[in-house]
Amino acid sequence: MEFLRPSTLAEALALKAERPDAVPIAGGTDVMVELNFDHRRPDALLDLTRIGELADWSTVDHAGGTVRLGAGVPYSRVIAEVGELVPALAMASRTVGSPQIRNRGTVGGNLGAASPAGDTHPVLLALGARVEVASVRGTRILPAEEFYVGVKRHALAADELITAVHLPAHAGPQQFAKVGTRNAMVIAVCSFALALRDGEVGAAIGSAAPTPRRARAAEAFLAAELPWGSSDALPDSLKRRFGELVAEATSPIDDVRGSAAYRKHALSVLARRTLTWAWDEHRTGERVCA
């Protein structure tokens, strides 16, 4: 196995064009597990850890309304540096593995693995994130919803690398919640993200379908039924119906972590809880961190 170690993005893209079979590695929290268990044996690894352009973030647009998060920024920095701008992403990042894994793992790596159980995917979908990818042919931007094309399959061309994720900053009340078999270092049984902004709703599920996906009918229902100009608490009937619609958006399986029926039930509960927390922030201005 060859170990390719570029020091610039241009060099990395040239190597990826020359060796499209080379597997990118940054934190290695997914790739090294597959190598250690002999689930994957690529001819080459493309180490991205020396590329400074991937390891930084910034706000863009004239009003700083978008966060451009480099694909190599680790979860620990997302929590410490980006949490006020994109709170749901920080919430999801806190649930990833252990402190050691959060110091190494990245949102770019989560995208590259494209696992339906990836912790950050529902947040990216709920917020309408865009994935920036590059090759020697140029750069293109993909809506997160178009990035996931199957179980652990993504829309990248063979010569492309993920360079950044673009997310809205200060995008209103947002929440993330996850069910696992224990409180730490666990793959999600199911997960859910919710965002409320300017009369619009983003809602997305993880680990309950072949890919992470938005709950479109639930979004449309909530956008129409929320009393946006009110400071009243929401009726239980509205929250219950929202939870039902979220559960209906799933197509889960039975596996060692949980049954399909349990995943549906758990997601309806997560939907109701996150809606309660997000709406309380909307009407009081005080964030609830799950």
Image (spheres, rainbow, N blue to C red):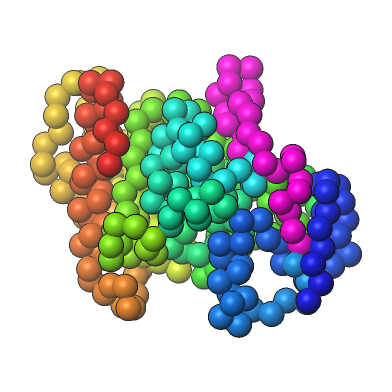
Query: Image quarter for residue 18?
Result: bottom right
- The correct choice, above or below, for 124 with respect to 206 in the image is above
Instruction: Tell whether position 49 is magenta.
Output: yes
- 4 or 17: which is nearer to us? 4
Q: Quadrant of the N terminus?
A: bottom right
Residue 64 percent across, percent down from the top left: 58, 21
Find the residue positioned furthest to the front: 100
Residue 98 percent across, percent down from the top left: 43, 55
- The correct choice, above or below, for 82 with respect to 145 in the image is above
Query: Image quarter for residue 239?
Result: top left
Residue 240 percent across, percent down from the top left: 15, 48
Residue 76 percent across, percent down from the top left: 50, 43
Instruction: Read off the magenta span.
Output: 46-69
The residue that appears at 59% across and 77% down in the rendered structure is: 36
Q: Quadrant of the C terminus?
A: top left
The residue that appears at 43% across and 63% down in the rendered structure is: 117
